[in-house]
Image: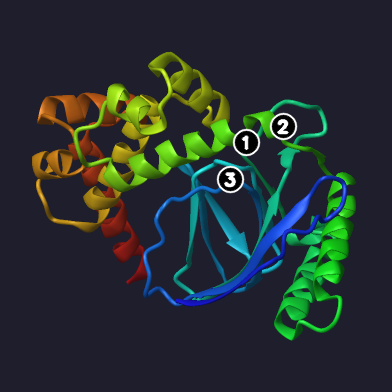
Amino acid sequence: MGLLRYDLPRSTGGQGLRLDYITRSRDDGDWQSQPHAHDCAEIFCVLRGSGEFRVDSERLEVRAGDLVLVNPHIPHTERSGANGPMEYLVAGVEGVRFQPPGGGEERYFRLRDEFSGGYRFYLEAILRECEGRQEGWSEVCASLTQVIFLLLRRQLFFRSTNPSRSKTGSECARVRQYIDEHFAEPLNLDELARLTHMSKHYLVHSFTRETGMSPIRYLLSRRIEESKRLLESSDSSVGQIGLSVGFSSLSYFSQRFKEATDQTPSAYRSALHAGEIQAEKEST
């Protein structure tokens, strides 16, 4: 995994926006990215190759030229496809949430190459300024960020985030990160509320507002996603997998898994194996 990261000074990008950082990454398949989230929005631009971008339980196929815009506090991850490493830029921008033109809330947006509007040019220009650090480089980066968002306005709406919610958003991001790191352990709402010094009611309300689901629903979704991965990649029994991701019994694991996927864990694994066998037959 190759990674370059540049953090920007505390300057504004215009219109209440602030470019926080920009990274350039190359996923060679030697590092397993885990779902993660940020207090800021992210602009993800694929430079070369192709791969998969995951937002919560959704999977997006991405390719060179694609742009993915992820709102703050939304869990996501990325990985290269089978045809070689994927290279990409990620810019973190504070003080903004992306919205569809008709209003409402969305977790992410994807702009295909033909609609990406030359954003790659400006993102690579920001990266060059960060690498060179010539006189006025941070001001140039701020101006380029403003250009990017002026172009985005033609395709999307965006709005400034409410400063009064920033602390709550950070606490919710902390809870989500804690769940991401400890989902296989016995967790409950009381423990998560103590972590943030919020009441249970306020935590549920705030977390649902920020992520679209309650903390316990998010915990269940993380366990289900990890169990899917293990059903695909390991030879462990269904019962062992259920216990390893935090479910207290096989029956409870099967119940929750079927609610999420309309299949039992055993049926899900059988369908995967049947698909692999069929793919092998078709390739011979």
Kindly identify the residue that appears in the image at 77 percent across and 72 percent down.
126
- Front tag of 3 and 1: 1
- N-term-proximal mark, 3 vs 2: 3
Q: Which mark is residue 259?
A: none
Mark 2 neighbour class, 10 Å CA radius: few under 14, some 14 to 19, many 20 or more = few
Q: Which amino acid does label 1 sit on?
A: Ser
In this image, 102 relative to 169: left or right?
right
Residue ranking furthest to the top: 201
In this image, 173 relative to 99: left or right?
left
Mark 3 neighbour class, 10 Å CA radius: few under 14, some 14 to 19, many 20 or more = many
For disc 2, the marked residue is 162
Kindly identify the residue that appears in the image at 43 percent across and 23 percent down.
198
Q: Position of residue 282 (x, y in %)?
A: 36, 64
Q: Which amino acid does label 3 sit on?
A: Asp
Looking at the rendered image, the quarter that the N terminus falls into is bottom left
Q: Position of residue 194 (x, y in %)?
A: 33, 28
- Do residues under tags 3 and 1 come within 8 Å of each other at their CB atoms? yes
In this image, 107 relative to 239: left or right?
right
For disc 3, the marked residue is 39
Looking at the rendered image, the quarter that the C terminus falls into is bottom left
For disc 1, the marked residue is 166
Q: What residue type is labelled 2?
A: Asn
Label 3: element kind: loop
Mark 1 neighbour class, 10 Å CA radius: few under 14, some 14 to 19, many 20 or more = some
Foreground pick, 139 / 113 = 139
Kindly identify the residue that appears in the image at 73 percent across and 44 percent down.
95
Foreground pick, 280 / 177 = 177
- Do residues under tags 1 and 2 come within 8 Å of each other at their CB atoms? yes
- N-term-proximal mark, 3 vs 1: 3
Q: Which image quadrant is residue 98 in?
A: top right
Q: Is residue 194 above or below residue 19?
A: above
